[in-house]
Image (cartoon, rainbow, N blue to C red):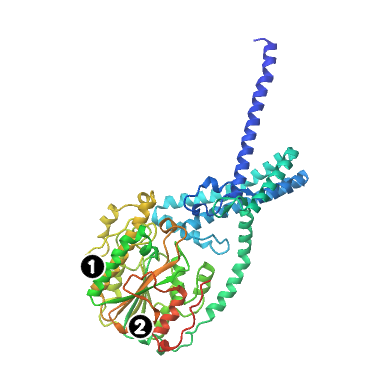
Amino acid sequence: MSYFTRFRRTPAAGNGAGRGRRVAARVVTVLAAVLVFLALVVPDQISRLPAGSSVPAALVRIPIEGIVAFAVLLVLPARARGIVAGVLGAVLGLLTVIKVIDMGFFAFLSRQFDPVLDWPLFADAYRFVKDSFSLPGAIAAVVGAVLLAVAVPVLMTLAVRRLARVAAAHRTASERGIAVVATAWLVTVFLGTSFVPGVYVASESAADLAHDNVLKVPAAIEDRRSFAAEAADDAFRDVPGDQLLTGLRGKDVVFTFIESYGRSAIEDPKLSERVDATLAEGDRQLTAAGFAARSGFLTSPTSGGGSWLAHATLQSGVWIDNEQRYRSLVSGDRMTLTSAFGKSAAWQTVGVEPGVTFAWPEGRFYGFDRIYDSMTLGYHGPAFSWATMPDQFTLKSFTDREYAKPGRRPLMAELTFVSSHTPWAPVPALVGWDEIGDGSIYTEQQKSAEKPGEVWKDGDRVRAEYAKSVKYSIDSLISWVREYGDDNLVLVFLGDHQPAPIVVGATASHDVPITIVTRDRKVLDRVAGWGWTDGIEPAPQAPVWPMNAFRDRFLAAFGPQQDLALPQSPPRR
């Protein structure tokens, strides 16, 4: 090959490399534009779009934030433009991380993430993944979340800076483009254009998200002040112990929370067939054993999770819907249902909490004389995903350790069931009460049952296993009442909250059933004014109270104050 031939081919090779770089640069620019666009327009409730809506249609939007940002960037000098673009990119990246977290919160808890109050929930999420799936899975989830939280702001900053440079290099075209898009935004605002109900083409969702999250700081401060006033307002604080719960003296009062037992379990056709049949059969069996029941509904402060918020609300008579309120409550001295029983000096108070796997100082606030947790209930069988032990074993351990003890004083107990906790697989099966032993009998059940990874591949299977788990919890309780219940038993059982939206959808209420069961008709006479319906399944027209109304109504119904006019139910927040 001659010198001149080589000389002629060198520029051609250089031009090819230059074209490749230009193509790569354009691809990077397009990817940056797509990243920024999606960050601005993707709704944080993308999983909650109306039925039949198209996700691509929900992305046909014009973000006003992008129009304003690039209009400002174009008029800035080069140095200032780079700095401002970097700041805007970092802020948009942080908002995108919050939006992703919001999507998770809406999917599991039916609400937005609160960047002021919700950080403790991440530790609970880690424990849930570890207990329900595996430790490696939990570690992988944490690593992925950290990488996402770091990568998104970094990539968003680089993307906005790149788009700012490109826009400045093509100033005339950029100015014309901004003018056209701004005009289109104004037109769609006036026309109210929308391809998906509730998702408008003229978008300002990023600005709204930033605004809402900034306002949560003063809102949290104000909520702290208002909660202090609510907690201090207690009509029963100064009632002498000998005037508390006089209508239940000599009774064993057992409050039982059934995890995720929501109103949808008995009214949603996709779930209720199995649960309704269980409740109908339970009614028949209890009636045959001489028991009667009344049922209603309570509105829980939480949904999809956060059971401790519901427990605290029912016990304290104050609306507890966030961690700040919960921590403020348990660090105070407000009287709970448990401490009211204790104050009367007529009951021993017992907490049975199989879901507690670590130190639980809140038990002292509630006023339990004794607490049994996952380590002290004597279980030596396998865990059922998150559930440390089957509900039937929890009941048997409580019976052996407290309820069946000869010569004991009357008991007030709170039992928390866990078998119907997410992920609803594997679900145990009932065994004979004399077969339970130390729980080893459940080993084969657990090995042969369906695992979460199998169930969660299909939404219909998730719903079916949820209904199956609620049936198991109710069957366990009804069987226990028939086996061990006597004339002195007063059982109150209720749900803590609805299950996650994957089971009940995005628009389900926060209502949960509540039931009181006893052989003593005088006990039921005291709650006749509540309007609750007969049986262990509340009728659709049964009254609905906010959960924080229950404590005062219960104390009034079973104390000398029962004939006094009750104030209106305390409002939900």
- Label 2 – label 1 distance at C-alpha: 27 Å
In which quarter of the view is residue 259 placed?
Answer: bottom left
Q: Is residue 55 above or below residue 573?
A: above
Quarter of the image for residue 279 reads bottom left
Counting from the top left corner in percent of width and height, residue 17 is at 64, 26
Q: Give me the residue at 52% from left, 47% from top.
A: 55
Mark 2 touches mark 1? (CB < 8 Å): no
Whether residue 1 is situated above or below residue 561 in the rendered picture: above
Tag 1: amino acid: Trp
Name the N-terminal-most of marks 2 and 1.
2
In-front residue for pair 298/112: 298
- Identify residue for label 2: 347
Q: Residue 409: image x %, image y %?
A: 31, 83
Q: Indicate the quadrant where residue 562 lies.
A: bottom left
State left or right for residue 505 relative to residue 293: right
Number of the label disc, if any, that sits on residue 389:
none
Callout 2 secondary element: loop
Residue where numbered disc 1 is placed: 433
Residue 250 at what x, y percent from top left?
Answer: 31, 85
